[in-house]
Image (cartoon, rainbow, N blue to C red):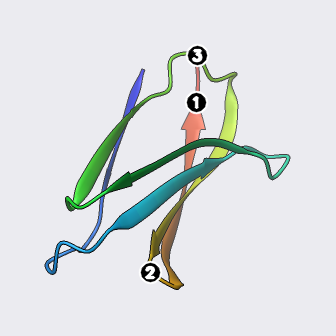
Amino acid sequence: DVVNIGFNNTNREKVTVRVINAEGKVVIESTTNNDFIHFDISYLPAGIYIAQVIKPGQLTGTNKFLVRH
């Protein structure tokens, strides 16, 4: 019911993390200065999602994950 996403953020920059569904729609978006973020995904429909980590001006990482209920 929770996804934990970790990333390199040693300078404590503002990082935006987006979760995108299979249709390309942003379903979750949040900003942090940490090197991790937690999302409650219990309400998301089952399926494949992509998490994007975006530092100022650049996409720094993507990961796929599966939601099953």
How packed mark 3 is, by other alpha carbons closer than 10 Å (few <14, some 14-19, many 20 or more), is: few
The extreme bottom residue here reads 57
Instruction: Answer left or right for 36 relative to 66.
Output: left
Name the residue: 63% across, 23% down: 44
First reached walking from the N terminus: tag 1 or tag 2: 2
Q: Is residue 22 left or right of residue 20?
A: right
Camera-nearest label, 1 or 2? 2
As displayed, is residue 6 above or below residue 43? below
Residue tagged 2: 56
Say what amino acid the circle numbered 3 marks.
Tyr
The residue positioned farthest toward the right in the image shown: 23
Q: Residues within 10 Å of mark 2 (few under 14, many from 20)?
A: few
- The alpha-carbon separation of the residues under discs 3 and 2 comes to 29 Å
Residue type highlighted by circle 2: Pro
Percent across and percent down for residue 8 are 24, 74
Where residue 16 appears, as percent x and y from the top left, is 45, 61
Q: Earlier in the sequence, mark 3 or mark 2?
A: 3
Residue labelled with disc 3:
43
Residue drawn where x is 58% and y is 23% of the image: 68
User: Residue 25, percent across and down?
Assistant: 78, 47
Distance between the alpha carbons at the discs numbered 3 and 1: 10 Å
Q: Which structural element holds mark 1? A: strand
Give the alpha-carbon distance from disc 1 to disc 2, as whole Å: 28 Å
Query: Which quadrant does the C terminus fall into?
Result: top right
Query: Residue 53: percent from the left, percent from the top?
Result: 46, 66
- Between disc 3 and disc 1, whose residue precedes? 3
Q: Nearer the viewer, mark 3 or mark 2?
A: 2
Image height of 1 relative to 58, above or below: above
Q: Which mark is drawn over residue 36?
A: none
The residue singled out by tag 1 in the image is 67
